[in-house]
Image (cartoon, rainbow, N blue to C red):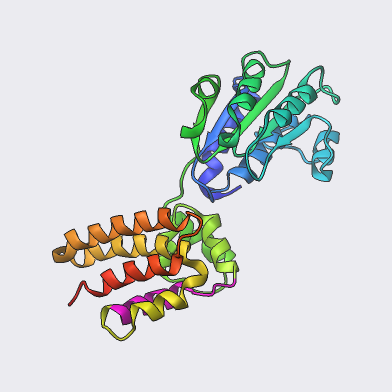
């Protein structure tokens, strides 16, 4: 269990042990904090026949089946795009009747915000009147997209976001090399995203990104050249630019109005490059050109 999620897990585990756990939980929080691992561990605990002190035993038939990935009373719903009504109806059918192992039944709905209106409506009755000993665990990083009727029938659990110190301490154990402190701050609230970024082969590492901007600000690098060099990951670098501009506000208070204007320009640029047919390099080049004019 990730350190920043341990207290929340302990609270839910205690409530389960005391038979005070709500049957429908909406686990909400930003991407990259470990919600998937959290909800799967919670599901294992709910299914365990011999849990002790808020921990699954790991030895009972239920735990062994869960490890093997074929527990008959454990179900998940997920989709790369929207969760359609057929997926929800199929999941509801699996929950009907008694548990095959005479214990609990668990359904996890990943990215619950991606349910269509019809699929969300199909879930309502089960949320209101679940079969005995059934738990529905909805996971989302965009709770505002859920229907109010879904939210009102669940207990909302706000998943903790780690502090910079927690992320740094965790990262030391996961990554063998020193990491730029600014880069950690960039992803401090999303440790798993941070680690994923480090593990990927970057065409533009963050250290090169910073050096490029330094060259831009001292007029040693042309904005067009920089935009072309960065064209393989324009959307990501536009988000990095938002963060970088935010940092410059603190470093250069006199330039604050211009920097905030550029920050807003970067936000709009991210939206623009998501539209098909837009020349992403041109959008990036315009923002970089405006940044290069700051000190002229």
Residue 118: x and y in percent read 62, 24
Q: Is residue 46 visible?
A: no
Query: With respect to residue 62, does 202 lie above or below?
Result: below
Task: Check if residue 211 falls in the magenta segment.
Answer: yes
Query: With respect to residue 211, does 132 lie above or below?
Result: above
Task: Tell me the residue at 80%/38% (across/down).
Answer: 63
- Which image quarter: residue 94? top right
Residue 202: x and y in percent read 55, 72
- Which image quarter: residue 183? bottom left
Task: Check if residue 193 falls in the magenta segment.
Answer: no
Task: Tell me the residue at 72%/19% (across/down).
Answer: 133
Q: Please count the marks in the image.
A: 0
* Residue, far front: 277
* Residue, far top: 129
- Magenta highlight: main SS: helix
Depth order, front residue of 139/262: 262
Depth order, front residue of 194/165: 194
Depth order, front residue of 229/76: 229
Q: Which residues are magenta?
A: 201-216
Residue 165: x and y in percent read 42, 57
Please indicate whether residue 154 sits to the left or right of residue 237 in the image: right
- Which image quarter: residue 74? top right
Residue 111: x and y in percent read 60, 39
Quadrant of the frame with the C terminus:
bottom left
* Residue, far bottom: 220
* Residue, far left: 254
Q: Is residue 148 visible?
A: yes
Task: Tell me the residue at 78%/19% (across/down).
Answer: 96
């Amino acid at each position: 269990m990730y350190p920043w999620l341990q207290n929340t897990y302990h609270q839910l585990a205690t409530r389960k042990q005391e038979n005070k756990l709500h049957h429908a939980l909406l686990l909400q929080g930003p991407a990259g904090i470990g919600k998937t691992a959290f909800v799967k561990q919670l599901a294992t605990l709910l299914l365990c026949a011999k849990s002790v002190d808020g921990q699954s035993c790991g030895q009972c038939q239920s735990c062994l089946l869960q490890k093997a990935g074929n527990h008959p009373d454990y179900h998940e719903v997920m989709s790369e795009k929207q969760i359609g009504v057929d997926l929800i109806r199929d999941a509801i059918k699996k929950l009907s009747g008694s548990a095959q192992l005479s214990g609990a039944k668990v359904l996890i709905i990943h990215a619950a915000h991606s349910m269509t209106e019809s699929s969300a409506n199909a879930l309502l009755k089960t949320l209101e009147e679940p079969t005995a000993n059934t738990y529905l665990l909805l996971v989302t990083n965009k709770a505002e997209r859920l229907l109010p009727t879904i939210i009102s029938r669940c207990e909302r659990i706000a998943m903790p976001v780690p502090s910079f110190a927690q992320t740094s301490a965790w990262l030391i154990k996961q990554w063998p090399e020193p990491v730029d402190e600014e880069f950690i701050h960039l992803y401090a609230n999303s440790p798993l995203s941070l680690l994923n970024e480090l593990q990927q082969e970057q065409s533009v590492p963050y250290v090169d990104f910073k050096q490029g901007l330094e060259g831009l600000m001292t007029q040693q690098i042309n904005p067009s050249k920089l935009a072309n060099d960065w064209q393989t990951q324009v959307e990501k670098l536009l988000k990095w630019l938002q963060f970088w501009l935010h940092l410059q506000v603190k470093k250069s208070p006199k330039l604050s109005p211009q920097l905030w204007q550029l920050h807003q320009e970067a936000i709009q640029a991210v939206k623009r490059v998501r539209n098909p047919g837009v020349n992403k390099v041109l959008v990036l080049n315009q923002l970089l050109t405006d940044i290069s004019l700051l000190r002229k």
